[in-house]
Amino acid sequence: MQKSATTVSIVDSLQRAVANSYTVFMNYKRYHWNTFGPLFRDIHLLFDEHADAILKGIDEFGERVRILSAESIGSPEEVSRLATAKMAYPNMTVRAMIEQAITNHKLVISEFKDAIKTSDANNDPGTSDLFIRIIQVHEKELWFLSQFLARNDGLVAT
C-alpha cells in the first residue's frame, strides 16, 4: 500500500517526536545524575520526575507510528539523526542544564504545534490528541524550570 505524502509528513513528525523525547529524557537523566549545589535535592528529584514524565510519551509516539502503518525508530543513530533537541554535554552547570532544558522544551512545543496543524488539516484527530496531551507535559515542565531562573535568589538565578 502506497502512503500519501500527508501520512508520510505526519509519521515524520511522530518520528521526530520519538527522537526528541529520547533526547530530552536522556538529558534529564544526565542532569539528574550530575546535579550539585545548594538546591541539589530539589533539582535532582525534579529532573528525575521530568524524565519519568517524558519517558511515558515515547511509547505513545512510537505506537502511533505503528498505528499509521510505519516502522517506528528506536536506534541511537536514528535518534541522533532525527532529533532537533540538543543533547546535554559534559560538565554543565546547573543553570546551563536548566537553560538547555527550557530551550529544548520550547523547541518541542513549537514542533508539536506544527504537527497538530498538519494532523488537524488531514483529519487525523488521534495524532492531534496525542500531541496535545504530550505538549501539556512539556508546558508544565517548562513552567517548573522557568521558576528556578525567575527568582533571582542567587542560588541558581543571577
Image (cartoon, rainbow, N blue to C red):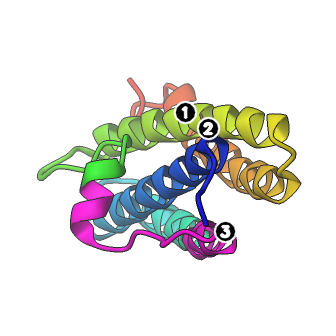
The mark closer to the camera, 3 or 2, is: 3
The residue lying toward the viewer, choosing from 125 and 149, is 125
Per the image, the residue denoted by label 1 is 106
Q: Amino acid at mark 3?
A: Arg
Q: Amino acid at mark 1?
A: Lys
Please name the residue shown 76% across and 43% down the image: 119
Residues packed near mark 2 inside 10 Å, few (<14), some (14 to 19) or many (20 plus) = many
Dot label at residue 109: 2
Residue 5 place in picture, x, y as percent? 59, 42
Residue contact at pointers 2 and 1, CB within 8 angstroms: yes
- Can the viewer see residue 135 in this picture? yes
Residue at the left extreme? 90
Instruction: Residue 30: name its quadrant.
Output: bottom left
54 in relation to 155, above or below: below
Give the CA distance from mark 2 to mark 1: 5 Å
Dominant SS type (magenta): helix
Give the CA distance from mark 3 to mark 1: 23 Å
Residues packed near mark 3 inside 10 Å, few (<14), some (14 to 19) or many (20 plus) = many
Mark 3 vs 2, N-terminal side: 3
Which segment is the magenta one? 56-80
Q: Amino acid at mark 2?
A: Ile
